[in-house]
Image (cartoon, helix red, strand yellow):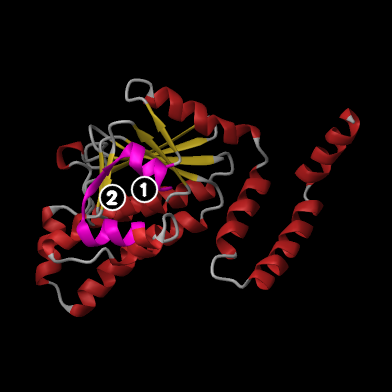
Amino acid sequence: MTEKDDVVLFAVQDGVARITLNRPEKRNALNDAVVDQLKAALRSAEANEKVRVVVISGAGQDFCSGADLSALQKISGASVSENLADARSLMELFLMIRRLRMPVVAAVRGKALAGGCGLATACDIVLAASSARFGYPEVKIGFVPAMVMAILKRNVSEKRAFEMIALGDEIAASEAQQIGLANKVFSDEGFETEVSGYVSRFKTLSTPTVALTKSLLYQIDGLTFASALETGVDANVIARMTEDCQKGIARFLKKS
């Protein structure tokens, strides 16, 4: 397969796996090929022991504009079973991001809309350029942002989530940061440099510890307080037994 055929690019350098949506002429819109190649890239990152962090971005001016016209046409003429398979494929992508052992960072330039906004929000961290725009406009074509709703509601307040999905308006990067949809907003001019500097921080941290932290954070989602504490006890014990923790404690005690 040539690079021209690759609607998703994958590269690993210095512990960072970079996954790039590569349909700039289509504003990196989602279709079956993009979703399949995204999942393949995530599997490659998971299998590479050198990878400490994954960065997902879009080629060209936009991060991802959601489903493309051909995907929408396919939906309109598909059977129930075909639509079910298609929806489950996207669900699998969101689950993969959450279950990946390393942090997944969305680096958002331009627009992240509909499923593209869902893709960004599904990541563990969202870094946005100051001119970036976020939104769930599905309601405007009589569609429901169904699976991404589960993600959005875990990132922002219930009322803010409802406003975004019921009105379908776009919001600026600064507002996305205010409501908890984005972690950081960087200038357009220095965006790439700032993103590289931010993700490089993971290269200095214990990979098993970060993986355990991510797993625990999402594992306690939906648990009762007591059950979450019990799950935390198990993770605490596992962390104590790791080589990285033993060495870290030794270094700390030596400094004291």
Residue name at image x 52 percent, y 50 percent: 46
**Neighbours of disc 2 within 10 Å: few (<14), some (14-19), many (20+):** many
Q: Which residue is mark 1?
A: 120
**Residue visible at 40% across and 41% down in the picture:** 177
Q: Is residue 97 above or below residue 172?
A: below
Query: In front here: 145 or 80?
Result: 145
Q: Position of residue 169 (x, y in %)?
A: 21, 51
Task: Pick the quarter of the image with the N terminus.
Answer: top left
Kind of residue at badge 2 = Gly
Q: Which quadrant would residue 233 be assigned to in this image?
A: bottom right
**For numbered disc 1, what is the local secondary structure?**
helix
Q: How many marks?
A: 2
Q: Is residue 146 above or below residue 80?
A: above
Question: Closest to the observer: 88 or 198?
Answer: 198
Give the magenta-colored segment's residue range: 160-182
> In this view of the protein, can residue 66 be seen by the observer?
yes
The C terminus, quarter of image: top right
Magenta stretch containing residue 157, yes or no? no
Three-letter amino acid code at the position of disc 1: Ala
Q: Which mark is residue 95?
A: none
Label 2–label 1 contact, CB within 8 A: yes
Q: Is residue 36 above or below residue 104?
A: below
**Residue at 83% across / 44% down in the picture?**
246
Q: Among all residues in the image, which is located at the extreme top? A: 189
Disc 2 from disc 1: Cα separation: 6 Å
Binning the other alpha carbons within 10 Å of mark 1 as few (below 14), some (14 to 19) or many (20 upward) gives: many
The residue at which mark 2 appears reads as 116
